[in-house]
Image (tube, rainbow, N blue to C red):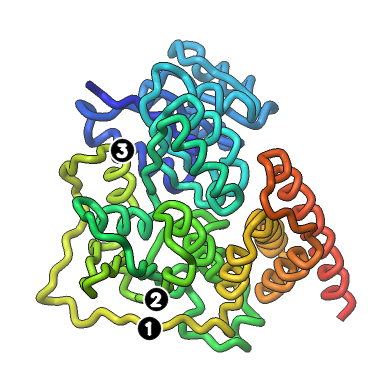
């Protein structure tokens, strides 16, 4: 039986690669529902090419454009953010690939979990903001969560068939575009510099998170929830070659690693076809020409987002949610040219300081924390913008 997939965020980097994977295995996979925030033209193109059942365009001003284009193809068109979770929860859906960027992926993911859908999770912010709630719901509604991030997919693959407990997770990081740069050079970094990732082709938000290494902080928190492992037992290691995607150390000292050339289609496909492996036309590793694999500790002083993330999850409660919201706001400000690259960290730190701590937040309090922290961070951005302009 074909697995019918709902792709939440089909026009982004993960979504477009997922559609490529699906197109390569028409007897196994089928794109059923696609959703996009505002990229109407690409959504229309995808819907027609993959002959989907329905689409959602979250931006209501684009509804008429999408409807007129898809009506001749008998493809249903919905609009508004609330429609995303409803379609993802439909009886005709087997797997929901959550590839929406940021906190916006939380609500539809929860709706899909409550409908008992298998979740192919590419939205790390969902677990960062509400990890405890999400994992409890997944257990309650018997909704499996299969990670799509290359690092978490690697850990997940390393654990297949294992009965021993995890002693340590070794979470690999490429180091991003500023790995070999000085702190002085990072002070003067342009938007183009920060987006220029040496290994991965990602969306702008994820690329900036990689440049600050906040993405690795978010992934550490995600790994904590996915694999029920204490943050102190999750070690981040810089691995510039991006061949080893992560490792697991077991109680006897053995270390298992998952390796492949950098290609996000591999973890996407693994999540959509799990527990099976199917063919993929990705580049193979040539070990005879592979000169070296390097691993070393990240510089926490140069990349203070890592300290912030470890402190946030150690404190717990709603603090990781506030950290994530502040990061989203600060990255948006940087991408719009309002603040310097190194000021992203300052905004996150100040926002956390101003956040009212809630030890065991409800889902409503998580949403309120996100809203409040985002507003706080935005105000701090404006203050820094004015300060930068007066210099």
Left or right: 45, with 153 as reference point:
right
**Residue 103 has which mark?**
none
Badge 1 marks a residue whose secondary structure is: loop
Residue at (81, 63) in percent of width and height: 354
Q: Is residue 46 visible?
A: no
Q: Quadrant of the N terminus?
A: top left
Residue with the mark numbered 3 = 272
Residue 207: x percent and y percent? 52, 62
Measure the alpha-carbon separation of dots 3 and 2. 28 Å
Choose top left, top right, bottom left or bottom right for residue 279: top left
Q: Which of marks 3 and 1 is nearer the N terminus?
A: 3
Residue at (61, 70) in percent of width and height: 311
Badge 3 marks a residue whose secondary structure is: helix
Choose top left, top right, bottom left or bottom right for residue 312: bottom right
Q: Say if mark 2 contacts mark 1, CB within 8 Å.
A: yes
Q: Decide: few, some or many residues near mark 3? Use Cα within 10 Å; few <14, some 14-19, many ≥20.
A: many
Labels in figure, total? 3
In the depicted view, which residue is nearer to us: 105 or 256?
256
Residue at (68, 26) in percent of width and height: 60
Residue 235: x percent and y percent? 42, 73
Residue with the mark numbered 1 = 296
Residue at (38, 48) in percent of width and height: 147
**Residue 237 has which mark?**
2
Residue 263: x percent and y percent? 31, 56
Residue 83: x percent and y percent? 60, 24
Q: Is residue 54 visible?
A: yes
Measure the alpha-carbon separation of dots 3 and 1. 32 Å
Q: Decide: few, some or many residues near mark 2? Use Cα within 10 Å; few <14, some 14-19, many ≥20.
A: many
Choose top left, top right, bottom left or bottom right for residue 118: top left
Q: Is residue 348 above or below residue 122?
A: below
């Amino acid at each position: 039986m074909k697995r019918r997939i709902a792709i939440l965020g089909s026009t982004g980097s993960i979504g477009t690669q997922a559609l490529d994977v699906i197109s390569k295995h028409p007897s196994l996979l089928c794109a059923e529902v696609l959703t996009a925030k505002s990229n109407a033209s690409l959504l229309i193109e995808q819907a027609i090419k993959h002959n989907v059942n329905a689409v959602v365009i979250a931006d209501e001003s684009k509804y008429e454009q999408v409807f007129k284009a898809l009506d001749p193809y008998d493809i249903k068109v919905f609009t508004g953010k609330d429609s995303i979770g409803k379609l993802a929860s439909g009886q005709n859906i087997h797997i929901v690939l959550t590839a929406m960027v940021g906190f916006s992926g939380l609500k539809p993911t929860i709706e899909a979990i409550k409908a008992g859908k298998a979740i192919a999770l590419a939205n790390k912010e969902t677990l960062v903001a509400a990890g405890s709630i999400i994992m409890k719901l997944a257990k309650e509604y018997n909704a499996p969560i299969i990670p799509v991030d290359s690092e978490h997919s690697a850990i997940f693959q390393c654990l297949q068939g294992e009965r021993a407990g995890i002693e340590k997770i070794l979470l690999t990081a490429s180091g991003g575009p500023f790995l070999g740069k000085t702190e002085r050079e990072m002070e003067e970094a342009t938007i183009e510099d920060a987006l220029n990732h040496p290994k991965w082709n990602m969306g702008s938000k994820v690329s900036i998170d990689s440049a600050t290494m906040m993405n690795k902080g978010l992934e550490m928190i995600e790994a904590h929830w996915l694999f029920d492992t204490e943050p102190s037992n999750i070690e981040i290691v810089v691995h510039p070659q991006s061949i080893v995607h992560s490792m697991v150390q077991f109680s006897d000292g053995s270390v298992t690693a998952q390796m492949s050339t950098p290609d996000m289609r591999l973890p996407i496909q693994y999540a959509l076809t799990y527990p099976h492996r199917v063919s993929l036309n990705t580049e193979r590793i040539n070990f005879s020409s592979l000169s070296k694999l390097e691993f070393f500790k990240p510089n926490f002083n140069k990349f203070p987002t890592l300290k912030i993330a470890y402190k946030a999850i150690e404190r717990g409660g709603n603090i990781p949610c506030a950290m994530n919201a502040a990061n989203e706001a600060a990255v948006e400000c940087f991408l719009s040219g309002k603040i310097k690259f190194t000021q992203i960290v300052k905004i996150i730190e100040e926002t956390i300081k101003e956040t009212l701590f809630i030890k065991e937040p409800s889902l409503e309090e998580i949403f309120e924390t996100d809203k409040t922290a985002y507003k706080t961070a935005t105000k701090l951005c404006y203050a820094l913008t004015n300060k930068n302009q007066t210099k």
